[in-house]
Image (tube, rainbow, N blue to C red):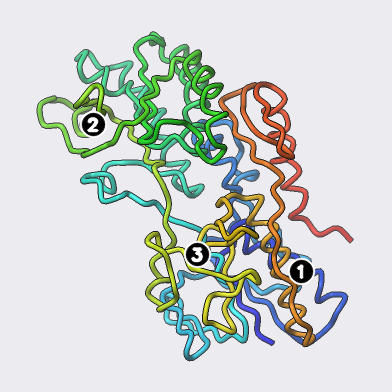
Amino acid sequence: MELLILGAGYAGVRTAIELDRLLEHHPSGSSVTLVDRNLYHQHLSMLHLAATGNAPEQTVAISLDWILRRRNVRFQQGEVQKIEALHRHVVLGDGLILPYDRLVLALGAETNYANVPGAREYTYTLHSYHEAMRLYHQIKNSFALAASTADPVAKQALLTFIIVGGGFTGVQLAGELAHWAEQLCTHYQLNRFEVQIVLIERSGVLLKQFGKWASEPALETLSRRRIEVLLQTHVTEIEAIDSIEGVAARQLRAVRTYNRQAQNLTFNAATIVWAGGIRAPHVIAAAGLPVDRNGRVYVDRYLRVHDQAAIFAIGDCAIVPNPQGQPVLATASYAMRQGEHLARTLLDEIEGRAPHPYIPLDLGQLVSLGPGAGVGNPLGVPLEGLPIALLKQGIEAWYLTTLEKIF
């Protein structure tokens, strides 16, 4: 049986690793192929650290050759161009056609700009290691340019950092950026009070994935770190600035917002990060598969795509239901366990057994708020502060050890 996995993120890599383990003990003649556009697996939970200079490359972008070197999994680099379910094959960007008997969609997610004018053209995103490095250099260059800029208006804009989205990505980036800003100000002999970090969230709470309880401690921590948080605020437009002259002006943008209390607010900034939501890659909807408004494909309790006998989907690109019919969160921990379960389901199909339904296990989530701070609910227990920060560091380090096959 030809088993084809699209995407080498948390879900796809975990499916491949577990399939290799299972097929080693249950030989069947089946082959496993893993496809990704990159030559490396991305530890996405650490991207905010990479973007602020606190994570070495080898811990964030991990070579797929290294991960698969002792495993019976073929890797094919390529961009998925088309999924043709009727013919049971996938077409890559270079024209290569990959047939399959069973297909696993683990393509992750891309940025959802919510049709905000200028958001796609003028913002930075944080969904890949490449994007993290691009943001890292942008932040560092903004401080360097501010240190040599005489125009106070341009200097203020260079030292203004706008983060749109108060979910996991936006909050973690804000916390780390505030810490890094202290170091950059010392290095470039700038005043920390000149640096403005603004976190914009359209709902009334931060980290709404947790519910309301986590918002207050997160707000308190970010406030202590001189981060301005605007809740119930919408970004309505981002546009280039023509009124400021000089070298710096080419980088500057105006971020226009709307808030019911303050009405219209405008920020001039050189660095705008869009962390305001995700959607599934368009190639899934283009395949004619059933998707929601954000392009995520519907699956049943066996992780099989609705009305498709040979296609499964997991991770951020899928709507995976819990026993109550509600979708589980799009997080690394869920994606990994979905991959492990799906590998066992595929083995059941190979050996002609009935599969077992996927039952989500909620182990809780952890969010850092900068060095030594965080909020989370490990095993359902709400906690904040240093214990969460240390636990998150430990889990991220542990994850790297799970990628290596030890004989």
26 on left or right of 232: right
**Image quarter of the N terminus:** bottom right
Please tell me whether residue 383 is drawn above or below residue 195 in the rendered image. below
22 on left or right of 100: right
Q: Which residue is mark 2?
A: 258
212, 209: nearer the viewer? 212
**Image quarter of the C terminus:** bottom right
Q: Residue furthest bottom?
A: 87
Q: Which mark is residue 71?
A: 1
Q: Amino acid at mark 2?
A: Tyr
Q: Earlier in the sequence, mark 2 or mark 1?
A: 1
Q: Residue furthest left?
A: 243
**In the picture, residue 65 is in which quadrant?**
bottom right
Mark in the foreground, 2 or 1: 2
Near mark 2 (Cα within 10 A), the count class, few <14, some 14-19 or many ≥20, is some
Mark in the foreground, 3 or 2: 2
Which percent across, then down, holds residue 360? Answer: 68, 57
Q: CA distance from mark 2 to mark 1?
A: 53 Å
Q: Amino acid at mark 1?
A: Arg
Q: Earlier in the sequence, mark 3 or mark 2?
A: 3
**Which residue is found at the position 58% from the left and 54% from the top?**
328
169, 213: nearer the viewer? 213
**In the picture, residue 390 is in which quadrant?**
top right
Q: Which residue is mark 3?
A: 37
Dot 2 falls on a residue whose secondary structure is strand
Dot 3 falls on a residue whose secondary structure is loop
Q: CA distance from mark 3 to mark 2?
A: 38 Å
Q: CA distance from mark 1 to mark 3?
A: 20 Å
**Which residue is found at the position 72% from the left and 74% from the top?**
345
